[in-house]
Image (spheres, helix red, strand yellow):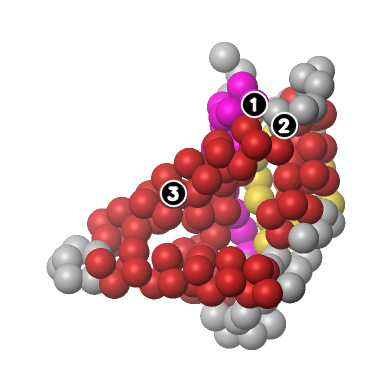
């Protein structure tokens, strides 16, 4: 349990540091995009490293759906100590991963009070998913959506090469 709290506090401090570092710039919209990109890039590298470590003894995956199932069960369980609550797909490369109690948002109040702050705390996780997929041979776009905290939906669109 202590390591969960440490990860959550570290994540909050990383987000805070990235936003404070860019706070001196005058163009607020460009600053927000830069901060989100920085956090997403950090998450991408972490996702690449973690998935490499987690899959070293696993057999190869037969298709995209197997990769996504591994991400939702094993990867998510190891990183966030719980599985994804719901995985949906249209079988054409689009997947929606729903976590009804996303640990990086639970420190905020439930409901809609801090809804506008949520995206900056999801950029790292989007990058982590994208980095994990990249190391498993899948390129895609990952976006996050929050309608009521701490519930979160990650949409993954796999790009067919």
Q: Secondary structure at mark 3?
A: helix
Asked whether, in this view, residue 140 is left or right of residue 12, the answer is right
Q: CB under 8 Å between callouts 3 and 2?
A: no
Q: Which residue is mark 1?
A: 136
Give the magenta range.
130-147
Q: CB under 8 Å between callouts 2 and 1?
A: yes
Q: Which residue is mark 2?
A: 55
Name the residue rendered at 50%, 42% in the picture: 44
Tell me the mark number nearer the camera, choosing from 2 and 1.
2
Disc 3 from disc 1: Cα separation: 18 Å
Asked whether, in this view, residue 10 is left or right of residue 8, the answer is left
Disc 3 from disc 2: Cα separation: 20 Å
Mark found first going from the N terminus, 2 or 1 = 2
Determine if the magenta segment contains residue 135.
yes
- How crowded pointer 3 is (Cα within 10 Å; few <14, some 14-19, many 20+) is rated as some
Q: Is residue 140 visible?
A: yes
Q: Secondary structure at mark 2?
A: loop
Disc 2 from disc 1: Cα separation: 9 Å
94 or 12, nearer to the observer? 12
Q: Which residue is mark 3?
A: 42
């Amino acid at each position: 349990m202590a390591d969960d709290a440490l990860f959550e506090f570290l994540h909050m401090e990383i987000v805070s540091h990235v936003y404070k570092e860019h706070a001196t710039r005058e163009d607020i919209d460009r600053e927000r995009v830069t901060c989100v990109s920085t956090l997403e890039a950090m998450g991408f590298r972490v996702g690449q490293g973690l998935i490499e470590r987690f899959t070293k003894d696993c057999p190869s995956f037969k298709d995209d759906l197997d990769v996504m199932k591994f991400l939702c069960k094993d990867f998510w369980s190891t990183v966030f100590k719980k599985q994804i609550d719901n995985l949906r797909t249209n079988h054409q490369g689009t997947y929606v991963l729903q976590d009804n109690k996303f640990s990086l948002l639970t420190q905020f109040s439930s409901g809609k009070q801090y809804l506008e702050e949520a995206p900056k705390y999801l950029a790292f996780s989007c990058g982590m998913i994208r980095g994990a997929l990249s190391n498993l041979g899948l390129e895609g776009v990952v976006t996050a959506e929050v309608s009521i905290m701490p519930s979160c939906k990650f949409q993954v669109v796999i790009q067919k090469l």
